[in-house]
Image (cartoon, grey):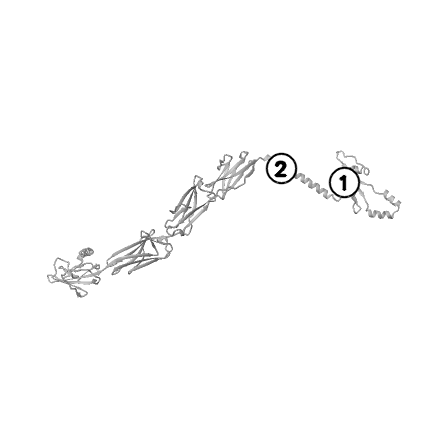
Amino acid sequence: MKAVATLALLQLYISATADLVTAEVSGNVPIETALSASPGDIVVLPCYTAGKVTPLVTRWTKSGREIVTGGDPTRRFIVSPNGSLKINGTMPGDVGNYLCNSTLPDNSSFLARVLLQVTSGPENVSTSISPATALSNRTLFTYRGSSVTLRCSSSSYSSQHLTWAFRGDSSSNDSLVSGSGSSLEFTIQDIQPSAQGFYSCRAHNPVSNVTVNSSTELLVYYVSDRHPECKWTLTQNTSLVQFTCTWLEVYPTPKLRWDMGPFQVADSLNVTMSRSTLSDGQTVNCTAQDQHLGPEKEKSCSFTLKLPFPEGEPLVSTLEASNVTLTCTETTSKPPAITTWRKGVQQDYIESGSKYILSLEGPVFKLTIVNVTKEDEGFYFCHSENPLGLRELEVELTVKTSSAYTGVVIGIFIAALIVGSAVIIAKVVYNSRDRICLGGFGQVDDDGGDVLSLVESDDEQVFQDAVPRLPPITNGHHTTLVQIHRIPSSDHEDAETADTSPQQQEDTVQTEEPVELVEF
């Protein structure tokens, strides 16, 4: 069947090109025709086709040697009545220039030259890509960073041209390398995901103009060096939370799972959990696994849940008609808590306005109350809630009027006045210490000087016989008496007494200075 189909094609080709074989009878100039055939084909070389005249004699030669022909069908070369040469089972050795010399009935001659080319292929085109692994659908995959070699081979006669081409997401039929020969290689160093696509080896026979393609899809797998990312998303229902696990820069799509749940093939995996399934200090974990690398290449991410814990000053006081700011700091909550300010036992929600100003500075939530009045006095609550639960900071605000501080100011002034007076009196007494000697009665100065005795008015009767009483002061106050005595030294006195006569001693006593009285 193959030979019959080939013969039909050759006859069609010969019929289409018959007008090119024109007889130049008068000049005997040969007409050249080129034909090609595959090994085993039946080919017919035309000779005289200018008219319906049957040549009397036809001779065929190849490279100057006459071809032995005959009418036996078993022979490979047969000359038809119209002078054409039929070759059965064409062989590669049949390649060459054939010359036809026909003698027409009018004794004129006709020359025709035919160039026969025997071609085969391209056939048995095979490709290989390594290192690579075949999937069940015969698609190949390799890993990012590998050095991949592409090989293509084909059999073709008499020559062939091989080309490696690539078609990917960002390119179309880009020629990578070309060459002549039975095989062709091309190496991709450090292959990247952008090199994923279809690789085609194109084999072309320039003689027969036949082209054969062999295509292979190559996938480039890669696993990110980073761990998957775990994050949360709060919902309108504060008792619910959505956890999301994402592992990007991974191909093919990885397998993800939350805690002990089943693995699912996805780039991102979401799970919604309620307050009843969560607890303070609980660790939530996501495991990511490459589809082909298996458990030994697992990566994971996790976070530990924490209840909110608002902190701040529980007692705050301020003056009426002033501005006061209540603060609340929350840094421990995970997932982050929603923090609001509320007032009173009913915990009325506070919103920003002319009376209240809400602000946030990092983790510090501030509530500023403008123009405080007694009505603003009471309890305020810093309300922090996350999916695990609710915690509050209670702040008691006390508002004082300005009159409440008047007594305090007066008291402080009086106390300061008393302390100042005491300091002044003490300083005066200290500066007069050379005139006053504080001590008991009968104390004697070592130098025989004056002695100052201070006697309280209640004890004055001790000296009633020795000291005359002074009349009372008109203001009714008691009078303090001060007696100044000149007392000689005892040793000196004894010596003097021993040396004087009794008369001299009597005179001395009579001449003693009177007591001086000083009134304060």
> Which badge, 1 or 2, comes first in the chain's sequence?
2
Q: Mark 1 near mark 2, Cβ–Cβ under 8 Å?
A: no
Using residue 105 as the reference point, say whether residue 171 is left or right of it. Answer: right
Mark 2: few/some/many CA within 10 Å (<14, 14-19, 20+): few
Q: Amino acid at mark 1?
A: Leu
Q: Amino acid at mark 2?
A: Val
Percent of width and height locating residue 90: 20, 60
234 or 161: nearer the viewer = 234
Percent of width and height locating residue 234: 44, 42
Q: Residue at x 64, y 38 (%)?
A: 413
Percent of width and height locating residue 201: 30, 56
| Circle number at residue 409 | 2
Q: Residue at x 86, y 47 (%)?
A: 497
Which residue is label 1 attached to? 454
Quarter of the picture holding the C terminus? top right
Residue 504, compared with residue 162, is above or below; it is: above
Residue 420 appears in the rendering? yes
Q: Residue furthest left?
A: 106
284 or 77: nearer the viewer = 284
